[in-house]
Each structure stands twice: as structure tokens, then as C-alpha cells.
Amino acid sequence: MSQSFLPMQGVRVVSLAVNLPGPLTAARFTELGAQVTKVVPPTGDPLAWVSPGWHDALQTGQQVEALDLKTAAGQARMAQLLAEADVLLTAVRPSALARLGLEWLNLAGRYPRLCHVALVGYPPPDQD
């Protein structure tokens, strides 16, 4: 992609999508000029275990933060990231997001400019 055509330049993305479609999407956002912060669990990204080379290539140019979103400190850091973000990218079951307080209805009220891109396998009622 030409460095002169970066349609997502200036867009800040936070990615919680560690399953394969997520890293591919985040990599494409990065190629299009977005600033991507990838949030991984404390144990790391499972793709790094399966295919380290591909994992490294997909996260090139991204900031990576390991956060435990089940802790107050992890939730506080996530809130900071979301306060500055334009897009939240997820590939997580809606019920898991809800347990973390990251369901869309909650986020939309707290971060009115945030856009949520949810990579899901099935529509309701089979989304979980």
C-alpha cells in the first residue's frame, strides 16, 4: 500500500481480538495507517504459540499490552485505552465481554465516539 494513501491514518484502534480473524483485521488496519494497540491476556497471544513467525508478522507496527482484564488494574488501563480510541476490535463471545463490563451498551454510554467492530461467528441466538 502506498504511504501516501493511508485512509485510517489518525484512527486509534484497540484490539481484543487474539483469535485469527482479529490479528488479520488488526494487521490490515495497521497497513491502512491506523495506530493499533493489541491487548493480550497475561499468558500472551495463543497464535504466538501456534505460529510464531506469522504472529510476529501480523503484529508488526502495533503496540502490544498484556492486561489482566479481570483485575482492577487491568480494567483501569483498558478504560484509559478506550478513552483515547476510535475503534474497539473484538473477537470475543458477547457473554465474555459482558462479564468484563465491556458489552457494547455499557461502552457506548461511556465512550460515545467509540466504534465497535465485533468479529463473531454466529448471529443471535447462537452468538456464544
Image (tube, grey):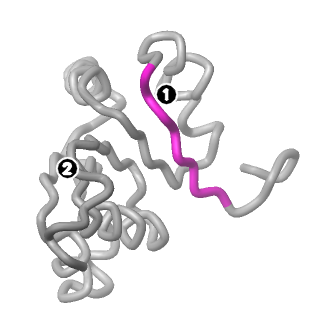
Residue 81 part of the magenta segment: no
Instruction: Name the residue beneath numbered marker 1.
Output: 102
Q: Is residue 27 found left or right of 119 in the rendered image? A: left
Residue kind at label 2, given as amino acid type: Gln
Q: Locate residue 55, reporting x and y percent.
A: 24, 78
Q: Which one is in front, 60 or 41? A: 60
Q: Residues within 10 Å of mark 2 (few under 14, many from 20)?
A: many
Q: Locate residue 81, reporting x and y percent.
A: 24, 29
Q: Which one is in front, 75 or 57? A: 57
Q: Locate residue 97, reporting x and y percent.
A: 54, 35
Instruction: Name the residue beneath numbered marker 2.
Output: 35
Region in magenta: 113-120
Residue for point 16% across, 67% down: 4
Secondary structure type for disc 1: loop
Task: Give above or below for 32 relative to 127.
Answer: below
Residue for point 38% across, 61% down: 18
